[in-house]
Structure formats: structure tokens, C-alpha cells
Amino acid sequence: MLLEEFNYNLPESLIAQVPAQKREMSKMLVLDRLKKDFIHKHFCDITDFLTENDFLVLNNTKVIPARLYATKDTGALIEIFLVREIEKDVWVSLIKPSKRVKEGMILKVSEDLSIEVLKKDDDKWQIRLIYEGNIFEILDKVGNIPLPPYIERKMTSEEYKALDFDRYQTVFAQKEGAVAAPTAGLHFTQKILKKLEKQGTKHCFVTLNVGLGTFKPVKCENILDHKMDSEWFEITEKSAKMINEAKAQGKNIVAVGTTSVRTLETVMNKYGKILPIQDSSELFIYPGYEFKIVDKLITNFHLPKSTLLMLVSALATKEYIFKAYEEAIKNEYRFYSYGDCMLIR
């Protein structure tokens, strides 16, 4: 399977730079895998397409303000991107400009936070955070939300910073650790979740800490040579019980986002059933994959040649997904993280 088969042309004007004015007013393209047709709706209509026979699985990971700006003792500005914590206060990170830092160097972010550069590991660095108090409270004060590279607007505006702190986070985000949002969940409001619950569409949460691998381009010509980055996930005892009960009752498991898909499918592949577990996923889903538990998917529109586009193509066939993308482009849907979404039935 060649990488070029998953390419498409997107007008730059359709890359969403800001979210919809209201979360629930994003457009929603409804796909039916049997009829192969398209219905144009808004996300607030999701309650018309789900019933008591559907069970939602959402990712409650919380995006941390992982982009930091620090100074050397010379006054030179250094950008640090926290990727993941590997032990208490020790993080794998990206540093720019990399050639300006050395092992043992102390960088100052603020009065509350300094960074010790430990060692270089390929293209990344291990660093130690030096602080007193709660690190996530400090990061909320001094950090910046790590927006994807295709959102190309100035980070300086306080108004934009406040917007991103609010909107590049799901309303049910709880567990800190992600450096990118599980974007399909961004469309939900508490009001919609309550309305779904009231009509009998129950839900539970899993946690997958979305990593930089989300934006990692596939570089091999043959996609089968691609290796996924490892991402930590957790399924609690309560959620495992709810998912297994829903499946036993014959309900459709509706994954909200590709991160929920990979969490559920990883556990099913390893253990044959959903267990309460903390583990890591390196599962690469592409056409030909047989889904073990996911029946329906709510997902945003993904980048050309991305593993996420390959995943949705595995669920709904590449031909149908590419027709859906053509339909979305023709109708000026907004693409990527802050963009519109699809419901694949």
C-alpha cells in the first residue's frame, strides 16, 4: 500500500485557524457505510443519529500547556516543548534552537520554574523541571497550548491564548498528559452529553495521552514500513465494565475520535476483551484491518497521507472516505483540529 494513495489536495483556506463560534455548531457530515450516501448536518444534530442502542466512548485526556519559553543566563530565548514525562519531573522534550543548549545547563522559564538540561537522545532532549508546588498549576500560568503546526497564527495575542486554553480542550478533559487534543471530542458540550444520556445513549471515558506522533508524518513509500509512536492509555474498572456490558447487550460501540479507537482496539487485540488496564498503544490501523469492537466513529477531517486518514479508511473503505472528503471540500467544510467532523455509521 503506497503512501501516495492517501494523498488529496486541500485548499489552504479550508484549514481551520480558529474553532467554530460555538462547539456544537461545527458542521457534521454523516456517512452511512451501507448506503454510501452523505447527509449534511451540524454537530448539535448528533442526538438525532444516536439511540439507546449506541454507547459512546470518549477520551478524557487533558492537554497540558506544553510549549515553554525560557532564557539562558546570556538572555538568549529558548523554546521547549514537553513531549512526555518518563519519571517524576523528568521529561522528553524538543528544544529550539537545539545547538544553543548543552548538558547541565539551567534555563529559566519564570520565578516558579527552571529547567535543567540532562542529555540529548536522538533529536530529543531529556530535561528536569525544577519548581515548588503543583507543576500543572505552574504550567497553566507560564505555558502555552501546543497548537498543531498548521494553525499558523501569532501566539502573542492574549485573546487567542485565552481562546486556545478554553477551546483546544474538551469539556470533559480530566487527566493531564496530552500534548494534542483528542479533537473529535471538542464538539461536545455538557448539554449534548446530558441530552444523549436522557435519551438512553450512555457513555464512558478512557484516557489516551495524545503525543507528538499524532503529527508525525509517514515517510516510507510503503505504509506498511511505518512505525507508530507509543502512547500511554488507561481504561478504568468502571469504564471496562460499562463497555463490556454495552457490547454484551448488542449495543453499537461509538468511538469518539481515533484515540478512543486505538485504545479499545489495542486492548481487544491483546486480550480479546476490554480490561481495566494501563498500557501503551503502538497500533497502526490501515485498510484491511478488522475492527474487533468499534462499530461507529465520530472524527474530524485529517491530513493527507496521515495515519489518521488511513484509520478512517480502514473503517469505511478508502474509496468512500475519499468521496466524503471531496464532498466536504465542495461544501467548504473546515478541516483538521479546529475544523468540522464526520459521523461514520
Image (cartoon, rainbow, N blue to C red):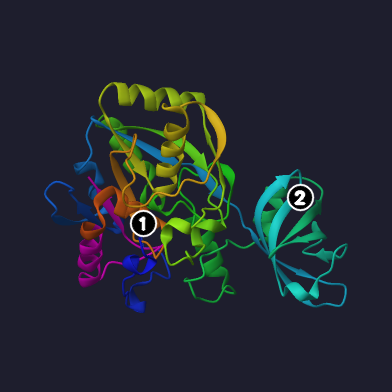
Magenta residues?
A: 321-345
In the image, taking residue 344 as reference, residue 225 lies left or right, namely right
Image quadrant where residue 95 sits: bottom right
Q: Is residue 304 visible in the rendered structure shown here? A: no
Q: Which residue is identified by label 2?
A: 90
> Up-down: is 188 above or below 123?
above
In the depicted view, which residue is nearer to us: 216 or 243? 216
Give how far apart the Cα atoms at labels 2 and 1 are: 33 Å
Q: Secondary structure at mark 1?
A: helix
Taking the image as shown, residue 179 lies to the left or right of residue 71, namely left
Report x, y in % for residue 121.
73, 60
- Mark 2, mark 1: which one is toward the viewer? 1
Give the SS element for disc 2.
Answer: strand
Which residue is rendered at x = 36% and y = 78% of the image? Answer: 12
At 42% from the left and 60% from the top, the residue drawn is 223
Total labels drawn? 2
x and y percentages locating residue 56 in the rendered image: 34, 36
Disc ID at residue 114 = none
Query: Does the image show residue 255?
Result: yes
Residue 218 higher or lower than 174, as above or below: below
| Residue sitting nearer the eye, 218 or 81 | 218
Where residue 275 sits in the image (x, y, percent)? 48, 26
User: Label 2 amino acid?
Assistant: Val
Of mark 2 and mark 1, the one earlier in the sequence is 2
Q: Which label is found at residue 310?
A: 1
Q: Quadrant of the N terminus?
A: bottom left
Question: Does the magenta portion include 297?
Answer: no
The three-letter code of the residue at mark 1 reads: Met
